[in-house]
Amino acid sequence: MAERLRTYLDAVPMAVIIVDETERVANANRAAETAFAAGADLTGRPFVTVLRQPALFSAVEEILASPVVTAQTPGAAQRVIQIELPADGRPTLFEVTVTRIADGAMLAFADQTSQGQAEQIRREFVSNVTHELRTPLTALMGFIETLRGPARNDAEARERFLNIMEREAGRMNRLVGDLLSLSRVESGERKRPSQTVDIVQICRQALETITPSARDAGVRLELDADKTVQAKVSGDSDQLVQVFNNLIENAVKYGGAGGLVRIQVRPVAHEPVLRGPAWQVDVIDQGEGIEALHLPRLTERFYRVDSHRSRKEGGTGLGLAIVKHIINRHRGRLRIESEIGKGSRFSVFLPQAPVN
C-alpha cells in the first residue's frame, strides 16, 4: 500500500509531503525530496527539521489539531499560506496548501516564483509607463497654463513653447506607438512566420529608410553582402524591417561618431544555439561603445544606458525589447558585443529557410 501511495505521489508534478500525527514525515514524493533534501529520503524525519519555517510548522500543528474528516463530518480542514522556502538551493516562493487527512496532514507546494516575478515585472512596467508619460504631460500642462496667462500676448514665447509642446507630444506618440507594437509582437510571439523572405533585401529596405537621417548626421551606411546569393529565411518581412530599422537607427544615433555604420550579411554553416544553418546579420558601428555591465540588460523594457541622451534622441526605451521579441518569434537569437572606445556589434541570427 505504501509503495502504491508513493507511486501515486511521484506522479504529481508539485512537491507533496505527508506528515503523520506525531509530526513526522510519513511520505514525500520525488519532487519534494529533490527540492528540499537534494534527493535524500525524507521518510521518518521530524517535519520541523525538514523545513525550518515557524509559520509553516504552526499551520501543520493547527491542521493536525483539527478533527479528522469522516463521512459524517465532510469538509477537510485546510490552511493555505504563501511562504518563501529554499528549494534546489535558491529562494522560492510557494503557495502551500495544508490539508487534514485521515492519518495526518498533506502539504502541497505550488511554486509561485514565476507568477511573483511576472507580477513584479507588471508593476515595474506600469511604473515606467506612468513615469515616461507623466514627464511630457507635465511639460504640456505647464506650457498651456503659461500660454493662457503670462505669455498670452508674447508671440516669441508662444512660438518657442509651441515647438516644445510639439516635441513632447511627438515623444508621447512614439511611446504609445512602441507600446502598441510591443503588445502586438508579444501576442503573436508563439506563432512562427510562414513566409520566405530575402534578408539582404530586408536590410536594403531598412537602409533606404535610415539613409536620409544618417546623411544628416554625417554617418555613412555600408552594406556588405554577397549579391549572387539569396539569403532566404522564414520570416515576417514587416517585422524584420522593423528589427533592422531599429538596430541601424540606434547605430547611427548612438554609435555614429566614427562616421561609418556597416551591415554585414553572411551564412553560418551551423549555428550551435539554433542547431542548424543560419544567416547572420551584423550591425557594426565605430562609436563610443557600451560598458559590459549594461549589455545583459539592453533588451529590457525602458532600460537605458544614458537616459538623458536617449530621451534627447527621441528614444522610448522599448526599441530593443521589441527587437528581442520579434527575433524570438522568428526562432532566432540576438548577440550584443561592445568595447569602450571601439564601438558595438549587434548580431542577429536567423534560421535558414528550408530548401524546397
Image (tube, rainbow, N blue to C red):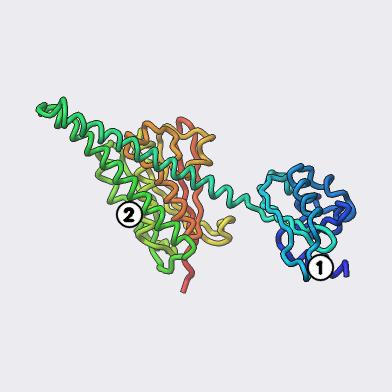
Q: Which mark is residue 204?
A: 2
In percent of the image, x 16 and y 31: which residue is there? 148
Residue with the mark numbered 1: 7
Coordinates of residue 160 in the picture (x, y in percent)? 17, 30
Residue type, numbered disc 1: Thr
Residue displayed at 35% across by 55% down: 241
Q: Is residue 41 visible?
A: no
The one of 213 and 66 positioned closer to us in this rendering: 66
Mark 1 element type: helix
Q: Tell me if I can see residue 270 in this picture.
A: yes
User: Which residue is more in the foreground, 119 or 227?
Assistant: 119
The x and y percentages for residue 269 are 54, 59
Q: Relative to 81, is 351 above or below?
A: below
Q: Residue at x 78, y 46 (%)?
A: 57
Q: Is residue 113 above or below residue 195?
A: above
Which of the pair 78/230 is nearer the observer? 78
Q: Earlier in the sequence, mark 2 or mark 1?
A: 1
Determine which quarter of the picture holds residue 41. bottom right
Quadrant of the image for the N terminus?
Answer: bottom right
Neighbour tally class for label 2: few under 14, some 14-19, many 20 plus, Cα within 10 Å? some
Q: Foreground: 92 or 213?
A: 92
Residue furthest to the front: 72
* Amino acid type for the residue under numbered disc 2: Arg
Q: Is residue 22 left or right of residue 148?
A: right
Residue found farthest to the bottom: 356
Question: Could you tell me which secondary element the residue under label 2 belongs to?
Answer: helix
Whole-angstrom CA distance, mark 2 to mark 1, is 60 Å
Q: How many marks?
A: 2
Q: Position of residue 102 (x, y in %)?
A: 82, 64
328 displayed left or right of 71? left
In the image, taking residue 111 as reference, residue 259 lies left or right, namely: left
